[in-house]
Image (cartoon, rainbow, N blue to C red):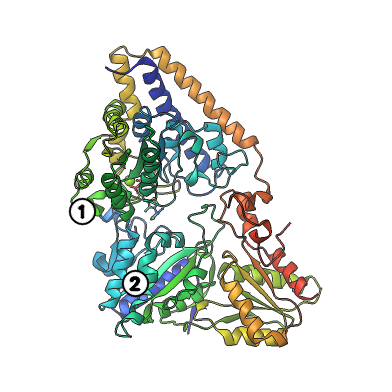
Amino acid sequence: MDINHDKLLWMYKTMRSIRAFEDQLHTDFAAGKIPGFVHLYAGEEAVATGVCANLTDRDYITSTHRGHGHCIAKGVDIKEMMAEIHGKATGACKGKGGSMHIADVNKGMLGANGIVGGGPPLACGAGLTAKLKGTDQVTVCFFGDGASNQGTTMEGLNLAGVWKLPVIFVCENNGYAETTSPQYSVSGQDIAARARGFGMPSVAIDGLDVLAIHEAVREAVSRARRGDGPTFIEAQTYRYYGHFEGDTVKYRDKDEEEQYRSRDCLLRFRGVVLEHGLLTQAELDAIDADVKKTIAEAVAFADSSPLPDTKEILTDVYVSFPEKEMWPFQAAPA
Amino acid sequence: MSERIISYREAINEALRLEMARDETVILMGEDVTGAPHSDEPDHLDAWGGVFGVTKGLVQEFGRERVRDTPITESGFMGAGVGAAATGLRPVVELMFIGFMGVCLDQVVNQAAKMRYMFGGKAKIPLTVRTTIGAGFRAAAQHSDSIYSIFVHFPGLKVVAPATPADAKGLFAAAIRDDDPVIFCENKILLDTKGPVPEGEYVIPLGKADIKREGKDVTIVAISNMVNVALKAAEQMARNGDGISAEVVDLRSLSPLDEETVLASIKKTGRLVVVDEDNPRCSVATDIATLAATQAIEYLNGPVRLVTAPHTPVPFSPALEDFYVPTPARVVNAVRETMI
Ligand SMILES: Cc1ncc(C[n+]2csc(CCOP(=O)(O)OP(=O)(O)O)c2C)c(N)n1
Ligand SMILES: [Mg+2]
């Protein structure tokens, strides 16, 4: 296998971190510790991991409402993520964005997004910057099967094709958009085929196989870096939890979930690396222990962090703007 | 008419059910308004009934032809609603959150709003857009807006924002029956609130404000959930023994606007406070202040005061979001300032 030892360790650690992060949130949400809309990525770890294994900090990604996995795989600080989701001042976005808007542009993470289909045009913009500045940066646009129907997605695909942008579109087809399956919502039934209509190479792959994803994206990234334009990848995957935390999941059957859990991306990866002697049981165990510690520290960090000062409400709207106009026609409350 | 206590959510559901039974051209479409549209399994039917469960039970009664789940294509299904309205249906389109108007704005403001005028009156667009407003849900910047003001700005659109279950039922029926496009703003914070609602057919004409509390010293004009904030402030002032009797005017309908009721109240009390959760620039709040300044200035015994959200998006952190939304304490302060 053409993949080095460090990268394999990184893949396992990344997938394990995402899983542990999401499982922790699932528990803490149920306990009433976490406010708002929280969409978990558990089950889909192989996609973000296999994709981001090909990227550097200088490359960009756009993400979705289900963005925690993309953040972790792109290197956003786990403590700051946890604090953000708890609405704390120490969060990645000072508590202003929350789960649905986590971002860290310094890590090339251009934001989770509360608008389904918000990402593809933004990804084209990042691709345009790289193209015009003559850098070799690429941008990966993550979006869902549901988002594949959005007009902005079609427009983004077309624009990337017309301008030969260094953008890789990764559709995470997890079988549902809220309660709605692509069997109903995707006319023609074949998401990957749509992209071919825009003149770009497009494949559908097993989204539970991190190594297959890594391979497919590696090719796409080199094509983009060479200036040969966009690629489309449909990764077929599954989310373990509800659409958001609190969803009672009455639109799919338990055995479907069980069936996917039996093909779990982490189990599968462990099986392959152990069987081929690529990683040892001790290495995997050490990562598991390490991740457990990291998540516990992140929770402790979030718990002990302060809430934002109410003065922060008026900051970060603009780069520059008259302060007195931030709460016009009245005295700003104390 | 007999009444019973039901929730704001149930009241909207009931109005929709009655209107669909009454007029077979009324259809409903939106994302997951039933749920699991791909499945024939009885267990999966109506899995959600809308993200907030407002449309639950309708598909059983009216079937999937008239209660349609849509792909995530707001421009597509909003525009389909406009086109269907222009050609003989009376569609109700559910747009999950008002912030998503950003995705389909052209269909609303260039198509729905302008068609009749551009066509010299030869078309009508009996479209109702149901959407949700309101902060306080910890839903952050893209899911918490109360940006009804921008739709008031557009000629050709009507805008409604009920505060009580009864008003929600009556105004929703009126919105569906109206031959113009109506943006119907449901406050997600109010969905579980309960109140007396008349049974059977119940229609409240658009363009009529409602005095939710009578008073003589100050007029507090409020919208949607801010009516409850204003009422709390009014009760506090009455109890506090500082002897201020506040009148609370619930606008209910933002376009058309019941200028008469607002002006009559200002003329009676001589003081005006407006409470509005929307961002303050070019807003319904500034409109009401303008109304007072242009048509009732001689009746005012003190400065007009506005209590609004700041000129910022809605923050996520509960600590910030609770500071964002107007509170009874801020309303009481504003009332005091009109007394200077
Ligand atoms: C423009 C817009 N429409 C609707 C929604 C509500 N919504 C949030 S997630 C979602 C489903 C998205 O499905 P998909 O793209 O498949 O992503 P997944 O949730 O499966 O990861 C919907 C309809 C939204 N946030 N933005
Ligand atoms: Mg999906």
- What residue sits right under mark 2 in the picture? B111
Looking at the figure, which quarter contains the N terminus of chain A? top left
Q: Quadrant of residue A109?
A: top left
Residue A242 relative to residue A256: left or right: right
Tag of residue A237: none
Amino acid of disc 1? Ser
Residue A46 is situated, as x and y percent measured from the top left of the image, at 34, 31
User: At which x and y percent is residue B46?
Assistant: 32, 58
Subunit of label 1: A
Tag on residue A187?
Answer: 1
Relative to the observer, which residue lies in front, A25 or A111?
A111
* Crowd class of label 2 (few under 14; some 14 to 19; many from 20; radius 10 Å): some
In this rendering, which labeled residue sits more in front, label 2 or label 1? 2
| Image spot of residue A158 (x, y percent) | 27, 49
Q: Chain of mark 2?
A: B
* Disc 1 CB within 8 Å of nearest ligand 1 atom: no
